[in-house]
Image (cartoon, rainbow, N blue to C red):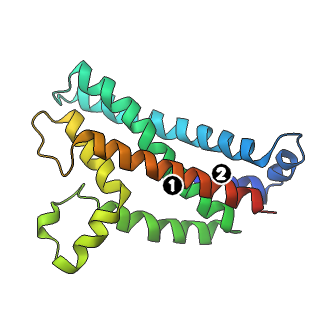
Amino acid sequence: MFLGISVIWDRQFGFMKEILVAPVGRISIFTGKMFGVGTSAMIQGIIVIVLGILIGVPLTILAVSLAIPLMLLITVGLVCIGLIIASLMTSLESFGTIVTFVNMPMFFLSGALFPVTNLPAWLKWAFYINPLTYSVDAMRTVMIPGWHYILPLQYDILIIFVFDVVTVIIGTYMFSRRQ
């Protein structure tokens, strides 16, 4: 999400004006930004996998080969959230503040750090509507043999895919409306 800051940098330094006068649609610009930022995020994820292998995390070729496309699917939605927020913001400070307020609850309520069973009942709804919950569950399912999952893997992937489609649609709409 934080990589969406590139849109604000481009806008502040005048590069965005040069891009917007090019004879391509804004949807193409948004898609290019999404893939560019997504590539950077994917490289970071692959570095984490390589470091895990180097320190002795027992990963199989199958687990890694399933995890990389899943990482790509997860990355699209999260990058789009960052780009949506960047489309609405005008300053770096406001972008950082808003992304933090979106990112931190999503991360802490995803089950990545602690199990949902310890959450109070009134807070569990946030866990179940959080798309990152299903991303964490899917990654654990492919990376940890015998993982007891929230939903079967195909449902996790379906939820992530729907989340991606929604964020891409909202992101392209917000980006095309931005001056």
Q: Residues within 10 Å of mark 1 (few under 14, many from 20)?
A: many
The residue at the far top in this view is: 61
In this picture, residue 57 sits left or right of residue 43: left
Q: Secondary structure at mark 1?
A: loop
Please indicate, yes or no, whether residue 32 appears anywhere in the rendered image. Answer: yes
Q: Measuring 59% from the left and 67% from the top, which residue is drawn there?
A: 95
Which residue has dot 1 on it? 1
Residue type (three-letter) at the residue carrying disc 1 = Met
Residue 3, image x, y percentages? 56, 50
Q: Nearer the viewer, residue 54 or 39?
A: 39
Quarter occupied by residue 174:
bottom right
**Residue shown at the point (29%, 26%) measured from the top left:** 64
Nearer to us in this view, 67 or 93: 67
Q: Is residue 46 visible?
A: no
Residue 160 as seen in the image, left or right of residue 91? left
Residue at 34% in and 60% down: 107
Residue 34's label in the rendered image is none
Residue bearing the label numbered 2: 6
Q: Amino acid at mark 2?
A: Ser
Percent coordinates x, y for residue 46 in the rendering: 39, 31
Q: Nearer the viewer, mark 2 or mark 1?
A: 1
Provide residue 36's location: percent of width, then percent of height.
Answer: 61, 38
